[in-house]
Image (tube, rainbow, N blue to C red):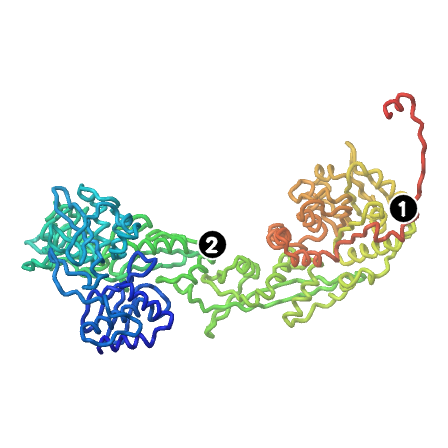
């Protein structure tokens, strides 16, 4: 296609505003046509606000164009301006009419004449092109390196030395208008700074050559040279010499001369016009001036293994090695390292040996590899190849192994106990080679099926309490592919693995099975609570029976008979059966007190404990005495010991009361009510703990709020059929206090202390409202708290007594 046709296409594709801006650029003679051929036309367009003129390339044969300005509009104003200039150049040369709105004068033409020093001419014959200068770089050899001078060369051959920085010249509009720098010129200017007569330092020269790669305006001793990309490396050759193997390292043959430290003048033999400057590589091996080359190393037959496994692969990683020896294995490039984990069973545990290898199957092993240092290579087998190592990939694999599995290559680790399934779960997510007898861990086909077995024993005749229920949950092992598996797994191990976030659980006969996560996500928390509520015989505590009923409903299992006896406790305290008051009771109970006695009686009949937390003054002592009988122990502060004895004689005169206190204290086996203090509970833990009590009351029970205290542990150890905590302030500071009270009253209701802290206390402290509501729902049937304002209508009228006291003279003086 003719250039004019391409210009017409650009004219039709350009937006009106873009074309108007292009016309202005063309009128201002801002376009310089640098090169022109049938395939492409290259132009530079000086744009306002840009230090570097964008480069435009037009492709007439392909009807395409390109501009490096980075604009979003195509064609941009720079492409359109180049098209206009191309049309003007054609009009001048062929007599055609110019583009409407563009004057034909001052057009730019394609350069055709030569230039001094062999540098291709840059510019056009127009007025604007005559003022466009380019930066020229003159290098000259000196005794210790290369000196550099810069100049601005114009199309007419004039050169103006650049005595200051290029940025300083460009800051002056009058001078900047005549210069057309490139991006490489600006980067070089930042690097070089002001001019200096001293040879360039090797580091600065190295950086300058990196910037000027591809630049055609560089001279060495007055002759044009190219700047080659990349580094030029030495050559290595391995050949046989008798029984020995000789390794020779020498300079590249295309080097003409070393002109500075780490820089060589290169060119093909016999080609005097194709010279280039190139940076030298592997200077530690060759020396900056190639003073260490050539190097010759002779290896005897006994040392050929180290040469093949270590020396040559390391050398081949740095430069090209020509192996002509028939005694050495071939060097293999492009093989990536990989990790292989050899697994084996170690009893109930798992043993693993990670290895860093090359090849599949491996033909080389890296020993003692670490993230900071590279280990030695050992070739596997005889006659196999030797790998050209990839240190970066090796270090990445070592770091990955340490980060994901906490292992080190070449070091065997054995995981036992709870650590074994944790590591097995990590292996399931590991992406790498696995070998050995335990490799099936990550492709386990066994699964677990829950099996619930309940055994219900009715309570004794005449006992209205709930049945005794034995809770037995097992997980049977089956095979996903239909094969035989067999065996069972204890439910506690399954739940523990699930709560720890594992996907596997160890089997009794070895190996692992996959957890039934979906089933556990739906029922795991309830199952965990039921497991914690079992005694040594597997029987559930009465407080766990309602949760058992819910689990049975969820699993479509029939509920054990007799669970409905606890229903009144969970529906509403108002529906509790009326209590049978003691015949010897000398008191008239208010309605809320009768409700409290009904609640206590129901709890005792159901073998449940409770916390009576009424406000002070509402008669907690009286309500507790209503259910007291033979074999009752009261633990209270020392200050109220005798108050309890007096209240018992006042309201229940027929009770035989024994105050267990004083230096000559002894337990009275015939006493109905034994009263002692918290101090003596701690001191006489053995004596009080070995006796089986029917009822144990803890008055001011906040005394055991610290579950780690001796008195709390002594209270937990008391053997009693019914436990009652009396406290007007059940929780004063921390929610752990509530756990301690409930652990005394209904052991296992809130789980273990660690479990309670993890699942409940931390969630409440973090502000989770759902956690607080779940806790309230759990303890609601076992805590009865009435405030004075709640029962105010039932309280007697307030009695006021006014006493007037006359102060004596001394008291009056102090008062005044």
Left or right position of 315 against 754: left
Residue 419's disc number: 2
Measuring from the top left, give residue 577's x and y in whole percent.
Answer: 84, 61
Q: Secondary structure at mark 1?
A: helix
Question: Is 115 placed left or right of 534 in the picture?
Answer: left
Up-down relation of residue 642 to residue 508 (above or below): above
Identified at 18% across, 75% down, the residue is 94
Q: Nearer the viewer, residue 338 or 448?
A: 338
Task: Check disc 1 and report the residue beneath it.
Answer: 651
The residue at 33%/77% (across/down) is 12
Q: Quadrant of the N terminus?
A: bottom left
* Residue at x 85%, y 45% (from the top left corner): 617
Please provide percent x and percent y for residue 609.
Answer: 74, 53
Confirm whether residue 306 shows in the render: no
Graded by Cα atoms within 10 Å as few (under 14), some (14 to 19) or many (20 or more), the crowding at tag 2 reads few
Q: In the shown orientation, is residue 86 left or right of residue 653?
A: left
């Amino acid at each position: 296609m003719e250039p004019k046709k391409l210009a017409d296409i650009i004219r039709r594709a350009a937006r009106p505003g873009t074309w108007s801006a292009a016309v202005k650029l063309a009128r201002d003679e801002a376009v310089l046509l640098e090169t022109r051929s049938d395939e492409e036309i290259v132009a530079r367009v000086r744009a306002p606000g840009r230090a570097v003129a964008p480069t435009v390339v037009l492709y007439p044969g392909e009807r395409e164009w390109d501009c490096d300005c980075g604009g979003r509009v195509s064609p941009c104003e720079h492409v359109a301006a180049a098209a206009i200039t191309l049309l003007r150049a054609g009009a001048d040369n062929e007599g055609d009419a110019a583009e409407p709105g563009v004057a034909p004068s001052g057009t730019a033409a394609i350069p055709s004449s030569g230039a001094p020093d062999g540098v291709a001419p840059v510019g056009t014959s127009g007025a604007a092109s005559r003022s466009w200068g380019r930066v020229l770089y003159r290098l000259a050899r000196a005794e210790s390196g290369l000196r550099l001078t810069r100049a601005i060369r114009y199309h007419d051959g004039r050169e103006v030395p650049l005595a200051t920085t290029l940025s300083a010249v460009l800051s002056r509009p009058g001078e900047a208008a005549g210069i057309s720098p490139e991006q490489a010129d600006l980067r070089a200017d930042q690097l070089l700074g002001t001019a200096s007569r001293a040879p360039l330092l090797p580091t600065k020269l190295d950086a300058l050559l990196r910037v000027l790669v591809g630049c055609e305006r560089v001279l060495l001793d007055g002759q044009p040279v190219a700047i080659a990309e990349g580094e030029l490396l030495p050559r290595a050759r391995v050949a046989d010499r008798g029984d020995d193997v000789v390794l020779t390292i020498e300079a590249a043959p295309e080097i003409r001369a070393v002109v500075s430290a780490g820089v060589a003048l290169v060119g093909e033999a016999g080609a005097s016009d194709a010279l280039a400057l190139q940076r030298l590589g592997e200077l530690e091996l060759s020396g900056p001036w190639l003073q260490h080359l050539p190097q010759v190393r002779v290896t005897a037959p006994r040392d050929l293994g180290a040469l093949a496994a270590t020396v040559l692969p390391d050398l081949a990683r740095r430069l090209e090695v020509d192996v002509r020896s028939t005694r050495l294995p071939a060097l293999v490039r492009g093989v990536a390292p990989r990790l292989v984990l050899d697994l084996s069973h170690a009893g109930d545990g798992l043993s693993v040996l990670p290895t860093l290898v090359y090849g599949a199957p491996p033909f080389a092993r890296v020993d003692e590899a670490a993230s900071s240092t590279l280990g030695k290579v050992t070739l596997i087998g005889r006659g196999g190849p030797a790998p050209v190592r990839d240190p970066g990939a090796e270090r990445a694999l070592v770091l990955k192994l340490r980060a994901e599995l906490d292992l080190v290559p070449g070091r065997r680790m054995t995981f036992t106990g709870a650590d074994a399934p944790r590591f097995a779960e990590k292996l399931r997510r590991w992406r790498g080679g696995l070998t050995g007898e335990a490799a099936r861990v990550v492709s386990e086909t066994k699964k677990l099926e829950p099996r619930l077995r309940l055994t219900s024993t009715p309570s004794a005749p005449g006992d209205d309490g709930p049945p005794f229920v034995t809770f037995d949950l097992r997980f049977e092992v089956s095979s996903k592919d239909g094969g035989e598996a067999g065996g069972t797994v204890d439910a506690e191990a399954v739940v523990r693995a699930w709560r720890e976030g594992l996907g596997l659980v160890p089997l009794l006969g070895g190996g692992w099975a996959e957890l039934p996560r979906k089933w556990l996500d739906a029922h795991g928390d309830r199952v965990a609570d039921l497991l914690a509520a079992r005694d040594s015989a597997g029987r559930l505590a009465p407080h766990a029976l309602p949760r058992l009923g819910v689990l049975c409903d969820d699993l479509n299992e029939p509920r054990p008979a007799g669970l409905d006896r606890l229903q009144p406790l969970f529906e509403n305290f108002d529906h509790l059966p009326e209590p049978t008051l003691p015949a010897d009771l000398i008191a008239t109970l208010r309605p809320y007190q009768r409700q409290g006695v009904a609640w206590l009686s129901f709890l005792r009949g159901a073998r449940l404990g409770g916390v009576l937390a009424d406000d002070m003054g509402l008669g907690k002592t009286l309500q507790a005495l209503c259910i007291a009988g033979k074999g009752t122990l009261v633990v209270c502060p020392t200050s109220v010991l005798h108050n309890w004895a007096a209240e018992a004689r006042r309201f229940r005169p027929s009770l035989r009361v024994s105050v267990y206190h004083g230096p000559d204290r002894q337990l009275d086996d015939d006493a109905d009510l034994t009263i002692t203090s918290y101090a003596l509970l701690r001191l006489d833990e053995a004596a009080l703990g070995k006796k089986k009590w029917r009822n144990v009351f803890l008055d001011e029970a906040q005394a055991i709020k610290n579950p780690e205290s001796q008195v709390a542990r002594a209270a937990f150890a008391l053997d009693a059929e019914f436990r009652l905590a009396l406290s007007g302030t059940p929780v004063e500071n921390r929610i752990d206090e509530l756990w301690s009270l409930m652990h005394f009253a209904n052991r296992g209701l809130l789980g273990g202390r660690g479990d309670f802290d993890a699942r409940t206390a931390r969630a409440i402290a973090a502000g989770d409202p759902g956690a607080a509501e779940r806790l309230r729902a759990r303890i609601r049937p076992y805590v009865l708290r009435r405030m004075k304002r709640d029962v105010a209508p039932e309280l007697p009228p307030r009695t006021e007594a006014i006493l007037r006291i006359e102060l004596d003279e001394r008291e009056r003086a102090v008062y005044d």
